Image (spheres, grey):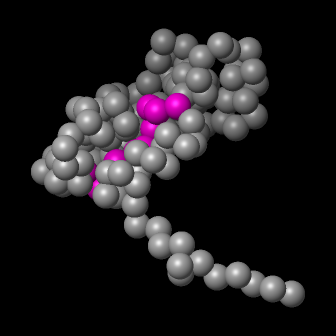
Amino acid sequence: MEKVVKHATSSTLSEQPSFYDTLCGEGGSNRVGDNTCLEPGTNLTVHFLNRDLFPNGAYLGLWQKRNIKAACSKKGCLVLHNNWIGGRIKKLERQQLSGLWDYDISERMCVQN
């Protein structure tokens, strides 16, 4: 993580390219096959998740579908990442409006001393 943070502090991009460049090498020089990287300094192996099972927020336009849950289910999604949208509030709104919001605030427990 220290290498990723160091890379990110000198980059004008988001943190994702810093993860990739640090773990997989500039231009993918540390790639081993189609879905794996081996970072030589730490011997850390990174395995990429299947995008059809774990799509990001931009993949296949799933977040733009009328029925997101059905569209994702049809594609075989296990997890749909709520990313590729700027800001916490926008993420919360999108999650709630999509029908994928499963958090019930009434079940929250308060612990008092």
Question: Which residue range is magenta in the image?
Answer: 77-86
Q: Looking at this view, name the residue that lies furthest to the left.
A: 74
- Name the quadrant of the N terminus: top right
**Residue 87 occupies quadrant:** top right
Residue 20 image offset from top left, x and y in percent? 53, 26
Nearer to the camera, 6 or 93? 93
**Is 46 situated left or right of 3 in this image?**
left
**Secondary structure character of the magenta stretch overall:** loop
At 52% from the left edge and 31% from the top edge, which residue is drawn? 86
Whether residue 72 is visible, yes or no, is no
Against 89, residue 36 (above or below) is above
At 34% from the left edge and 58% from the top edge, which residue is drawn? 100
**Residue 47 occupies quadrant:** top left
Q: Looking at this view, name the residue that lies furthest to the right.
A: 113
Residue 92 image offset from top left, x and y in percent? 49, 49
**Is 30 situated left or right of 50 in this image?**
right
At 19% from the left edge and 44% from the top edge, which residue is drawn? 66
Residue 97 image offset from top left, x and y in percent? 35, 51
**Residue 25 occupies quadrant:** top right
Task: Look at the image and say whether residue 113 sits in the magenta stretch.
Answer: no
Residue 106 image offset from top left, x and y in percent? 53, 79
Whether residue 101 is visible, yes or no, is yes
Against 65, residue 98 (above or below) is below
Task: Look at the image and say whether residue 78 sits in the magenta stretch.
Answer: yes
**Is 36 situated left or right of 12 in this image?**
left
